[in-house]
Image (cartoon, helix red, strand yellow):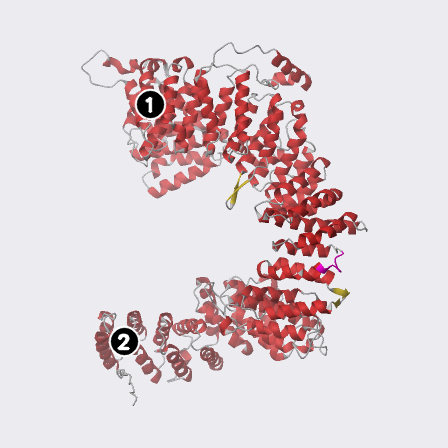
Amino acid sequence: MMSAMEAVCDGEEPEVVTEACLLSEFSERGEARALINNLPDIHHDTVSREATIEKFVVIMDRYQEQPHLLDPHLEWMLNMLLEMIRNEKSPPLMVHLCFKFLYIISKVRGYKIFMQLFPHEVSDVQPVLDLLCRQDPKDTETWETRYILLLWLSMTCLIPFDLSRLDGHLSTDPGLNRESTMDRILAVAKSFLRVSDKSRDAASVLVSKFVTRPDVKQKRLGDFLDWCLTTISQTSEVTMEGTVTLDGALQSLAQLFKHGKRDDFLQYAPTVLQCLNQKRIAESNQATLRKLGVKVVQRLGLTFLKPRLAKWRYQRGSRSLAVNLAQSSVTESVEATKLDLESVSQEEDYDIPEEVENIIEQLLVGLKDKETIVRWSSAKGIGRVTGRLPKQLADDVVESVLECFSFQETDNAWHGGCLALAELGRRGLLLPSRLSDVVPLIIKALTYDEKRGACSLGSNVRDAACYVCWAFARAYEPNELKPYVNQIASALVIATVFDRNITCRKAASVNILSPQGTFPHGIDILTAADYFTVGNLNNCYLTISVYIAGFEEYTKPLIDHLVAMKVNHWDGVIRELATKGLHNLTIQAPEYMANTVLPQLLPMATGMDLHRRHGAILACAEITHALYELATQNNRLHPLSIKLLLFYTLIWFSLVFFFSVCCLIEKLSLSKMPFKADPVISESTKPLHICMIYDIDAALSALAALCLQYYQVEPGVADVEMQDQLVSQYLLALESPEVLTRCGCALALGSLPPFMILGKLQKIFPGLQAACKVVQKAASLTEARRDAATAMVCVAVGVCAQGSPDRVLCESNIRPVYEALLGCMNDYSTDSRGDVGAWVRAAAMSSLMDVTLLVVASAPELLSSDLVQRMMCCLAQQAAEKIDRYRAHAGTVFLRMLHSTDPAVPHIPHREELLSIFPLETGTSLNWNAASQAFPHITQLLRLHQYQYHTLLGLTVSVGGLTESTVRYSSQSLFEYLKGIQQDATVLQQFGDTLLRIFRDNLRNDRVSVPLLKMVDQILANGCFDLFASEESHPFCVELLAICKEEIKKSKDVQKLLSCIAVFCGMVQFKGDVREKVLVQLLMLLCHPFPVIRKTTASQVYEMLLTYDDVVDDDQVLTDVMASLSDTNWESDIATVRTHRNQLCDWLGVPRPILVTKVTHLGD
């Protein structure tokens, strides 16, 4: 609907035209010609055929908006394809491919234009008909062939010769049992009217062209209409097949009554109407059938009425451009129109058939249909039929259309009514005398919004109302619309900037610059609110509206609309935008806001409607703040803003809708309202405490503003009573079992102004430190620990080495703060949401950075070397871990500490080496989120002794993780490091010791131990410990085996056991007692209770024996062992498996494991 309107409007805006009309010609004609020429070569290859079709579709689809550019090239494309089709040597597959290309072209250009190019000589009739008869209607792959052939046959039917001449001697030789061409075509058309594909539409076109021929009309029109009506009467729409059949019959009727002569079809119209009434198509469940029913009914109405152009219609100018240009002035045109209207003679000189009333009634009902396609068709039918009615009856139709705008009607009726009014206005059938009734309804439609459940209805109504405005602007002279132009302009501007739907905003914006230039300040407004600018809703509410409100005509309408319609909107986002918009608009009309708007909002703030109350409170807050800012700029207190003092208590104690109160408290505090001595201030923290649980950000902003304005005795000195009350209340709430309560109160402590914290640090720090600790019973309080870590730095109001521990960070309280934050760095809590401890670690990293930079700026001597070392090592560990987001955060903090020079962080271990690994430019060039960039840098920290443990600990979870890219790049970087130290026994031994220490420290900690086993497996497989393998029973190997045995002892974790099996198989490369002990462990696992463990062990031992050929010296024994491992069903029962396992022990020279029996001691 809107595309046509926008296209016309865009034609008047050169910049828009530049954007929309980028194509000037069919530039891909060479490529298209090549694709068509290649069809004989590629039609047999499925891949090439599909690729060619796709390329051709892409080329053609570029011209969907400008199909006329194809017109000079349609003929040669059609001729090339038809030449291949007519070639007798062309295989069927290629013929179908050519027809597919023809369909693609017709789809873009439109069948009405394209079908005119088909050859339509007498010699084409029989070949096309024969080819069509040979098609299989049930073949779903070749429907394009049937569609194009039906269109082609439709053109060949236009030959100006009697079809009986094509039958030759058929009529003179009664012995021949052959159908006539006329009957064959009719039979084909009827058969394709029943198919379910698009060829049904082409069959209806064929019917409209063929049955209306003079010779066919004389012999077959009645029979065909009878067949259609019989089909409609006897077919049920319950089945899909019945729906398709009804669709074809109704389409053919609509096309026939559209293209046929009135005199030929008038006699059949009553019968057809009666059949449709009996079938009750309007009550069908299928929208397509209802739409076709409306199309047939409106064509019947046009058949009943004589084709005439109503002389009473409103005519604006002339259809001739030359005549319009010759007009001396617009006034002369208007006068001529008025004289023409006055000279209209009475038109009651012909009778209107009584069936017309039934038809109009059906069309009016169609305007209220639930589907847009039905309403749109009904609206066009109303316009067409009304154009042939006398003036009085046409006015009755308009009156009936206006009844669609009752508030008892649904949004469907409003939408249909708008479409009908637009059609009537566009055709000159809505006389200017009716504008006084129509314009108020259209203005209501422009703001129509009906809530339905969790969404709203009405965007289509508002869009259609914009279409009505577009149609009226082009249908009437400016003088006719002059009395209403301000109302329409205000409504359109409101829709342009405040409508929730982007389509409606754009539809309204294209109406701003009407053709007559009567829109007040139209050019200026359109410059600010063009088609593309209004796409951003925030920009519309907060910027464009302010500019438009600068024009006096629109200031109050914009404000009134926000107060009446948007402040109480069902969508919370719209309510909040509306209140912010009122804040920005206050500067345009401060007196109106204070004297009129605020008195309207205050009663709304105490009402029962929660949406209205929420919006009203926010609006009061925003307007008050805006009035204060305006008064501050003018160096005077706005006298009208004092009036809020009289209403504040009234609003406050009637509120249960606490969320918006936060904004009210904040704005009134920022506005420095004189409430300091008011008892309501002492109660103002109550709603804030409730909001701490649900809307923390709003509550924190309000709390800070409230404290700054009302809890300060003098600058920098807090009200002691309120200070004690707030701090004690929040510290007590930090022990609450509710996680949201803890979060809100921790952040509240962090948001308090510095003067509220002074003298309370010795109470606040221990409370926050306790909230940061992981307690087994409170493992679910992750968010509270995160917010406590965040608040830790916020309460650090100052630093002084010898200062009071109750007022600043000093020597006596700095270490507990760091201990708490470093403890948070080891928070690896998990729940159903995953690694939620990462939230705490990220908050701790940020707080460590802020505290450290704060301390080094004032008293760097407070930072001891051990604290800095632990902090940097923890950051290095986080920068080596697997989650990209938190790795990037840790890397950023690490480099910020390292590169800080003014002042520099003291005691950073290996500072010079770190600066060589991470030069200053890496702070901006290194992408920590990319594993390919991060790990090559971070693994270099393994060379630095003090960072090796933590870096390797972080790398462990990355190398042994699940994410493919992280595993690939982290392991690649680790192996590059290990490759570089292969010849240095001391460094390799140090690495091995660090690895074993990590394993011991995280024994049975599955977060580390399972990835570590995977990492060790990869290290062994890559031969990184070959230096240890050359020495029998190397201490590293012995210790590793002992820890692995301890890790899987009594374990039922399948993943851990599988990882340990791989490690054992890799450890076979170590010679001496270690190899024998490893083989014992593997053979024990062959009798593990879990079948999957037994099977995997056998498989991996088999691969291990193939890899390490020195495990078994005797080839015969090796053959027997390999055969037993591969042939035995290791998923059998334990007794059977144990026999084979013991045999393997004997072959490998390993003692058989002894089954330990549990001994039960009986008491006395």
Query: Residue shown at 32%/75% (left/top)?
Result: 1108
Q: Which mark is residue 228?
A: 1
Q: Nearer the viewer, mark 1 or mark 2?
A: 1
Q: Quadrant of residue 1140?
A: bottom left
Local crowd size for mark 2, using a 10 Å CA cut-off: few (<14), some (14–19), many (≥20): many
- Residue in view at x 64 percent, y 49 percent: 606
Amino acid type at mark 1: Cys
Magenta stretch secondary structure, dominant:
loop
Residue 250 pos. (x, y %): 37, 26
**Quarter in which the C terminus is drawn:** bottom left
The amino acid sitting under disc 2 is Cys
Q: Quadrant of residue 1072?
A: bottom left
The answer to whether residue 37 is left or right of residue 639 is: left
Q: Nearer the viewer, residue 966 or 798?
A: 798
Against 340, residue 611 (above or below) is below
The span shown in magenta is 674-679
